[in-house]
Image (cartoon, rainbow, N blue to C red):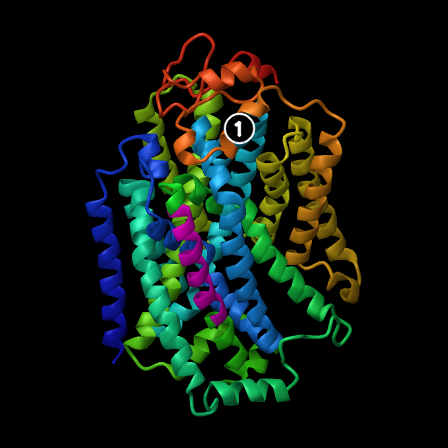
């Protein structure tokens, strides 16, 4: 019956190829390629947000390892992702981010920093960080699929990676963000259906005996909802808390997630996206960790943990509990989660180089068409690099994989949130937040390698990421309090405080220009440029001149 599994996989890949074909004419400009033109509906954006949030890492890595270790307490990760990482994130960040990007014309997170702080150098630094840390993270997503596909389809790991890369490259190159959102919607439906089926079969497996019986057995085994802070000399409950915080709060500062706030069509769509993406996250997150909780009653999960192969827990559960055909669907579920995440990571990386680095510094006069084509080829390049990293697994890059999410969150979260809500946030404060996040990550990582194992257990990758976020949250206001705020901030905050219909202007200059100039500019600027020059409002300039550069 293996042919059923192959049929499901073939239909899925054919569907993505069809998406590439039918969306090929929707990415002719930079705005089309990055923002899908005038934006996407709340429903489509919600699925794009949710499928970018969850990748193979949750199904293969986190759910198996943490579900087995923490039992029912691991469900807090899924709940935190839904409530804090989705619902609260949309409520706190989406409208103000959308208003700011609409007013200034910023298309990427580095451009948003440039406009808010009046500094092209902040854009440069953040672009480099995105490039350095997102490419290894993309490679880690590829790795999450290898063992599952070897079990289900009997396909070698490298073949899986190459197939994924080819399909992702196909629809990204031709369709850009619009193709990504359409494919995310289809993949999100597959994920929802697949998780419900997966949970149903696992919960009703004969050795589990149903949901109530499974819960009772976990409680009897001491794996309830509230674990001890320490256990067997290790930081047990503490590390669970760090994981909840990093995956739920850290996501607020990731460029591939923040990008969704740029692209949602309207403020009405923001409300719709908030509730849909939160419900999606709750089903996916809680469902995945619930399967991990019950692993011990289906297979000998302890043997995999003892051998350091916790990533194999979920694949073996699925092979044991799922019939042919449905097993192929679940494998495609995991593939869908990864493909959507990969496309968002690739877009974030390619835009950081093409728009923020090349257009901002090297080819300032480059045409929209040239930058658009450069982004397409950079998508192919970054996918190829991620494939090589995933297959070869060089030691130094593997270390970057484990730290990538936490490092980016530690660097970007504080400058982003303070920039949205505190007028006194300065350019120096933003630099301090980025530097603090990097420094704390580096120092704590080195300490984790030399401290005794008991002490090092308090410095896992999630914990390091949380401490980096805390460092940034302290550094930004501390430095901002003693430095001069940029001129023109009032105009940006007025724009963020007005409702959509009261805030029609777009492409105001970055702060650093006078408040009056910030208010009256934008009428004659091209919507694709997102910039203002005192000498000329050339739509292809991509730079900010005059006082904005001096700020």
Residue 309 visible in image? no
The C terminus: image quadrant? top right
Tell me where residue 528 sits by quadrant. Answer: top left
The majority secondary structure of the magenta stretch comes to helix
Magenta residues?
A: 269-286
Q: Is residue 401 visible?
A: yes
Q: Position of residue 291 (x, y in %)?
A: 48, 76
User: Which residue appears at 46% of the width and 40% of the height?
Assistant: 349
Give coordinates of residue 534: x percent, y percent. 47, 10
Q: Is residue 284 left or right of residue 399?
A: left
The answer to whether residue 176 is above or below residue 168 is: above
Q: Secondary structure at mark 1?
A: helix
Task: Residue at 50%, 18% (x, y): give it.
Answer: 518
Q: Which residue is mark 1?
A: 494
Q: In the rendered picture of this protein, how many numbered marks are placed on residues? A: 1
Is residue 363 found left or right of 396 in the rendered image? left
Which quarter of the figure has residue 8?
Answer: bottom left
Of 205 and 130, nearer the camera is 205
Q: Residue at x 45, y 78 (%)?
A: 316
């Amino acid at each position: 019956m293996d042919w059923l599994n192959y049929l499901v996989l073939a239909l899925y890949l054919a569907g993505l190829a069809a998406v590439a074909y039918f969306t090929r004419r929707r990415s002719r400009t930079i705005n089309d390629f990055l923002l899908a033109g005038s934006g996407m509906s709340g429903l489509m954006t919600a699925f794009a947000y949710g499928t970018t949030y969850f990748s193979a890492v949750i199904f293969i890595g986190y759910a198996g390892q943490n579900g087995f270790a923490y039992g029912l307490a691991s469900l807090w990760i899924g709940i935190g992702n839904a409530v804090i990482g989705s619902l609260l994130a949309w409520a706190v960040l989406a409208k103000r981010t959308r208003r700011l990007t609409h007013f200034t014309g910023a298309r990427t997170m580095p451009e948003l920093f440039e406009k808010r702080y009046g500094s092209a150098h902040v854009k440069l630094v953040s672009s480099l960080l995105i490039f350095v840390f997102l490419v290894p993270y993309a490679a880690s997503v590829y790795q999450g699929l290898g063992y599952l596909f070897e079990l289900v389809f009997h396909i070698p790991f490298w073949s899986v990676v190459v197939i994924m890369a080819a399909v992702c490259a196909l629809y990204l190159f031709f369709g850009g963000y619009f193709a990504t959102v359409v494919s995310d919607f289809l993949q999100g439906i597959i994920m929802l259906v697949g998780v419900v089926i997966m949970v149903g079969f696992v919960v009703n497996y004969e050795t589990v005996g149903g949901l109530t019986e499974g819960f009772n057995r976990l409680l009897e085994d001491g794996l309830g909802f509230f674990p001890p802070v320490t256990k067997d000399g290790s930081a047990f409950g503490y590390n669970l808390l760090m994981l909840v915080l990093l995956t739920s709060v850290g996501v607020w500062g990731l460029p591939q997630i923040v990008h969704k706030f740029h692209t949602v069509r309207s403020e009405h769509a923001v409300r719709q996206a908030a509730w849909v993406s939160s419900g999606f996250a709750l089903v996916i997150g809680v469902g995945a960790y619930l399967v991990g909780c019950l692993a011990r009653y289906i297979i000998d999960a302890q043997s995999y943990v003892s051998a350091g192969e916790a990533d194999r827990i979920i694949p073996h559960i699925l092979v044991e509990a799922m019939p042919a055909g449905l097993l192929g669907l679940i494998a495609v579920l995991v593939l869908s989660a990864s493909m959507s995440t990969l496309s968002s990571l690739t877009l974030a990386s390619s835009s950081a180089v093409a728009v923020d680095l090349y257009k901002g510094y090297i080819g300032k006069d480059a045409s929209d068409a040239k930058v658009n084509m450069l982004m397409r080829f950079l998508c192919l390049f970054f996918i190829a690099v991620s494939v090589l990293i995933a297959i070869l697994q060089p030691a130094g890059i593997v270390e970057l994989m484990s730290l990538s999410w936490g490092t980016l969150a530690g660097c970007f979260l504080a400058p982003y949130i303070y920039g949205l809500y505190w007028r006194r946030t300065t350019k120096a404060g933003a630099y301090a937040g980025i530097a603090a996040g990097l420094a704390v990550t580096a120092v704590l990582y080195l300490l984790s390698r030399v401290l005794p194992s008991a002490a090092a257990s308090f410095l896992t990758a999630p914990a390091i990421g949380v401490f980096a976020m805390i460092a940034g949250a302290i550094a930004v206001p501390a430095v901002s309090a003693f430095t001069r705020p940029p001129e023109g901030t009032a105009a940006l905050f007025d724009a963020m405080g007005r409702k959509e219909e009261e805030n029609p202007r777009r492409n105001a200059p970055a702060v650093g220009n006078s408040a009056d100039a910030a208010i009256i500019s934008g009428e004659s600027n091209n919507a694709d440029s997102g910039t203002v020059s005192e000498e000329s409002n050339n739509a292809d300039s991509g730079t900010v001149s005059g006082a904005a550069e001096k700020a």
